Amino acid sequence: MRTRLLPVHAIEPADERRWRLLAEESLDPNPFFEPEFILPAARHLGGAGGQLLLMEEGDRWLACLPVTPRSTRLKVPVLSGWRSPYSFLGAPLVAEGAERALPDLLLEGMSGRLTGAAMLDQVPADSRAWAALEDAIGAGELVQLARRDFDRAAYDPARSGPELELSSRRRADLRRTRRRLEEEIGAEVSFELVEPDEATLAEFVRLESAGWKGEEGTAVREGEGHARFFGEMARAFTARERLEMWVMRCGGLTLAIATVIVSGDVRFAFKTAFDESFRNRGPGTHLIVEITNGSIDGRRRLLDSCADSSNELLNLLWPDRRALVSVALARPGARGCAQARDPGDRDARRGTDRYRLKPGPRGSSWP
């Protein structure tokens, strides 16, 4: 096995094929580290200087961690798992049997001229990748400089059942708001899983920009290159039948649209938009309930909200939580290790600020 850093700008079609094969067999599904996401992000979101930290055997990729340099308050340069405003998971792509070599991959990356430490954001605490890293930390092969644990809303049908359980009060509220919507518009509400074609993508961008995200400047249309990124990313996942677009309509009006990326046995709630003029009727809530209970291909998948831990609506609707870890790691003896403390130490807790370890981007902004 060998490791290397591959600049994103140097990726060739054969590399993309190997990358996709690895993503398909990865122990921990992560669409945010797949070529359909990373390549548009590199082109349109300022990530052209990014690289892929790779472990290979022959012409097969065994592990891949997209990385970028990252600024911190440290005096050592830091290599970070790829971050963007739309990145909601940071687990490396790792093939079966290669997870135990993941610490070696990070150590090799740290020993290069780019970095003295490594930072990973939003790694699932129950992932095989994190288990391998924890074992390496316990064995002294890696030094944990700082760590932040958090969680976010999720819905796991294997744990909570095939249908979302709602309180009688919540069910009554949904019936009432739906009835008033239909009375106000003069038609019946419908929910559809539609083809993510150009018209639907444009409708989503328009609806999002007209709402609160447009006012706050966080809609994809508002940022330079963001709309181009969204369109290219959506088309790439659509081409591989990995993007779902759910639409709530009534009387010819589009009330809400949600985009969901499918990776392995996980559905990632990416972005949503709804008509602000019907906010008091909760179209976003109605659509979330429909998506939660909707079985696309007969398989029940974990639904990851990709939302802030503080998202009140999803925390109320969804009973499950996905535990995540953001961590700063270093080689034993590297500069900066002297600043590490016992995890319970107050200075160690300050380390999460020193390394700017935060729960990640703002979240998918689901209602």
Image (cartoon, grey):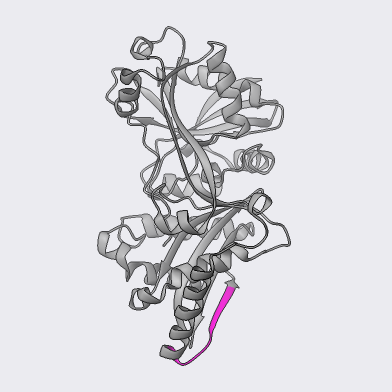
Q: In this rendered view, identify the residue nearer to me: 109 or 218.
A: 218
Q: Residue at x 59, y 70 (%)?
A: 195
Return the residue nearer the eye: 54 or 135: 135
Q: Which residues are magenta?
A: 185-192
Observer-nearest residue: 212 or 33?
212
- The answer to if 343 sits in the magenta stretch is no
Q: Residue at (63%, 31%) from the top-left corner?
A: 128
- In the displayed structure, 331 sits above or below 283; it is above
Dividing the picture into quadrants, the one containing residue 204 is bottom left
Q: Which residue shows up at 40% across the image and 39% down it?
A: 359
Q: Is residue 186 magenta?
A: yes
Asked whether, in this view, residue 319 is left or right of residue 59, the answer is left
Q: Is residue 75 above or below residue 287?
A: above
> Quick check: 344 above or below 29?
above
- Using the rendered view, name the quadrant where residue 358 is placed: top left
Q: Residue at x 27, y 24 (%)?
A: 73
